[in-house]
Amino acid sequence: MKKKYRLGNQPEEYELSEDYLGWLPEGDKTWEDLSFESVKNTELTLANPAEKDKKTIFLHHCIIKDAFPLSFFGEERSEKWGIFAIVSETQTSEKFIIPLY
């Protein structure tokens, strides 16, 4: 079972998925190349450079590590990432979090 987190004072909990580690926005070399304000609440195509695979997801918005509860900071993986995105498979499906960088 994957761990879920409540961000800030929000009632919703989101699963942190590592399924898209290494995937990048199609046409960009890094996540930093992407203008997050221009893609907020929109579909985004991700490409897996290692496998030449693509997947379209819905990007709701980006968050920083500080939005996570204190319990997250005790995990080893919390040291690896600072920026995350809340995404879903479609606009209306269940939302989850992916680490960006």
Image (cartoon, helix red, strand yellow):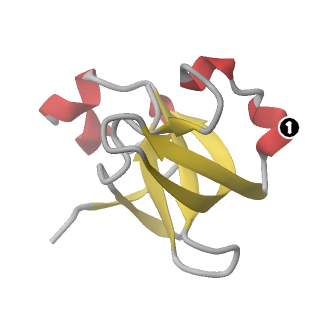
Q: Is residue 36 above or below residue 42?
A: above
Q: Residue at x 20, y 33 (%)?
A: 77
Query: On the image, numbered disc 1 is attached to which residue?
Result: 38
- What secondary structure is found at the residue carrying circle 1? helix
**Residue 4: quarter of image:** bottom left
Q: Position of residue 91 (x, y in %)?
A: 70, 73
Q: Quadrant of the N terminus?
A: bottom left
Q: Seen from this angle, which residue lies furthest front? A: 52
User: Within 10 angstroms of label 1, few (less than 14), some, or many (20 or more) residues?
Assistant: few
Image position of 87 with respect to 64: above or below: below
In this rendering, the count of numbered labels is 1
Left or right placement of residue 3 versus residue 4 in this view = left
Residue at 32% in and 44% down: 51
Quarter of the view holding residue 6 = bottom left
Regarding residue 79, the answer to whether it shows in the image is yes
Name the spot of residue 35 as percent of width and height, x first. Answer: 77, 27
**Type of amino acid at the residue the image marks with label 1:** Ser
The C terminus is located in which quarter? top left
In the rendering, at what x and y percent does residue 95 appear?
53, 69
In depth, the one of 27 and 21 nearer the eye is 27
Residue sitting at 52 percent across and 58 percent down? 55
**Residue at image location 82% in from the left, 35% down from the top:** 37
Indicate whether 41 appears above or below 67.
Answer: below
**Closest to the observer, 93 or 74:** 93
Left or right? Give the position of 56 relative to 98.
Answer: right
The residue closer to the viewer here, 10 or 18, is: 18
